[in-house]
Image: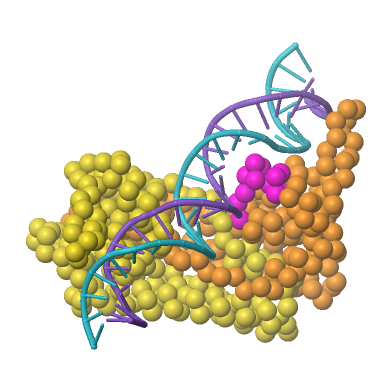
Chain colours: A yellow, B orange, C purple, D cyan
Amino acid sequence: MSLRYALLALLAVEPMTGYDLSKRFQSSVAHVWHAPDSQIYPELKRMEKDGLLQGRDVAWGSRGTKREYHITAVGIEDFRSWMNETLSYPPERDPVHLKAAYFEWAEPDSARAQLLAHIENFTARREDWQEKVDEILGDNNDILAKRLAQAPEEDRESIRAFKKFTYDGLIARAEQEIAWAESGLVLLDQLGR
Amino acid sequence: MSLRYALLALLAVEPMTGYDLSKRFQSSVAHVWHAPDSQIYPELKRMEKDGLLQGRDVAWGSRGTKREYHITAVGIEDFRSWMNETLSYPPERDPVHLKAAYFEWAEPDSARAQLLAHIENFTARREDWQEKVDEILGDNNDILAKRLAQAPEEDRESIRAFKKFTYDGLIARAEQEIAWAESGLVLLDQLGR
DNA sequence: CGGACCATGTAAGCGGTTACATGATTCT
DNA sequence: AGAATCATGTAACCGCTTACATGGTCCG
C-alpha cells in the first residue's frame, strides 16, 4: 500500500501525468520507495477508481492525449490519515544476515566477495542519499522547491528538516552496514580463511 | 527462495519432521528469516519433489504418522552453491523512512508515537538478538551444539564466530535505528511541534 | 526519415500473508 | 474427559517482478 501514498505525496504538490510522475518518482521518492512504471500506471488507475485522484485527458501533439492526475480532497484526507497511522513492523527477513550466519559453508573467497558486494551496495546508496541531502541544503531540488513555495512560511523549516532527518538516517544505516561488512572481512582474516 | 535455504541449513544438521522443523525454525533461523507454518509445509513438499530432501513416513502413536525429511546430496550441493552466490540487492523500499520524509503532514503527537513505536520495535529485537548472542557464547543452544558436535574441530571456532558476527550486526543496526528515532524526537521538540 | 523520448500499459508468475480447517496424541 | 500440543495443510488474496507490447511525438 505504500506505493499509493508515495504517489499521493507527489501529487499533493502538483497534478502530473503518469509519465511525469514516473520520472519525478525515480528522482525523488524512489530513494526510499522504489517502483517501476509497470506498477505506477495501474496503481494510478486504481487510485482514480477509488476517488483519490481525478484524471483528465490532455491533448498531446495533434492526435495524442495524455492523462493528467489531480489529487482530490478524498486523496488528501487519505494521505493525511495514513501519515497519522502507526505502521506495523513486519517480521525479520534478511537474506544477507541469513547467509552470514552460515558462512562456514561458503568458500572463503566467495564470502569475501559477498561482503565486498555489501560494502559496494551501501557505498553507492550512501552517495545517493548524500546527494539528496546536498540538494535539500543547497536548494536545488525541483519538487521540494515547489512544495516549499506552497507551504505556509512557518512549515518550511520543518519540511526541510524532516527530509534531511530521513536521509541522514539512511546514510547512518548505510555506514553501519559498511562497518559491519568490514568487520566481517577482518574476521575472515583472523580465522585464517 | 531464501526460505528454502533457511530450511536446508537446519536439515543439514539433522533430519526433522515439518513440525519439529517449524518449532526449531521459530527459535533459530526465524530471528533472521521469518516464516509461518503455512509456508513451511508446502515448501518442504516442493523441496522433496525437487530432490533436495527425501521424506519418509514415521509412525506416531497407534494410528498416526508424521513425515521426516532428510537432506539429500543434491540438497547439500544446492545449499552450498547458494552460499557461494552473491545476492542481488533489491531496490530500496522502506515505509518508515518514506513516512518520515513527509512528517509535516502528520500530527506532531502521531509523529512522536510513530518514532516511539520504532524505538520499541528495535529495542525488542535488540534484546532478542542479544539473547541469541548470549546463547552462542554460553553454549546453550541446542541446534548449534549439534552442529558443532558434527563439525571438524578446526571449523568450530568459525561456526560460532559467524553466528556472533551476524547477530552483532543486527544489534548494531537496531541501535542505529533507535538512535535515529531518538534524534527524530529531539527534532520534533526543536521545531516546536 | 530515423532515433530519442513521451506515453501507457498487459500477462504470467512468485513469494508471502491471513484466515481457515482438521484430526490425532499425550498429559492431567 | 478436556486441554495442550503434535501434525499438516488449503484457499484466497496481494504486492511486486519480469518480460513483453505498442504507438505517438519531436527534433535534427
Residue B10 figure quarter? bottom right
Q: Position of residue A94 (x, y in %)?
A: 57, 61
The structure residue drawn at horizontal position 66% and vertical position 77%, both measured from the top left corner, is A111
> Does residue A151 belong to the magenta stretch?
no
B56 in relation to B173, above or below: above
B150 in relation to A72, above or below: below
- Name the one closer to the observer, B66 or B54: B54
Mark yes or no: residue A166 visible: no
Mark yes or no: residue A93 visible: yes
Q: Position of residue A10 (x, y in %)?
A: 25, 58
- Name the one closer to the observer, B128 or B30: B30
A77 in relation to C28, above or below: below
Tell me where the magenta segment starts and ends, as one range: B33-44
- Name the one closer to the observer, A50 or A180: A50
Task: Determine whether, in the image, residue A44 is placed left or right of residue D28.
Answer: right
The structure residue drawn at horizontal position 83% and vertical position 68%, both measured from the top left corner, is B151
A164 in relation to A86, above or below: below
The structure residue drawn at horizontal position 85% and vertical position 52%, both measured from the top left corner, is B54
Name the dominant secondary structure of the magenta segment.
helix
Q: Position of residue B52 (x, y in %)?
A: 79, 57
Q: Position of residue A178 (x, y in %)?
A: 50, 76
Task: Determine whether, in the image, residue A79 is placed left or right of residue D5.
Answer: left
- Name the one closer to the observer, B37 or B185: B37
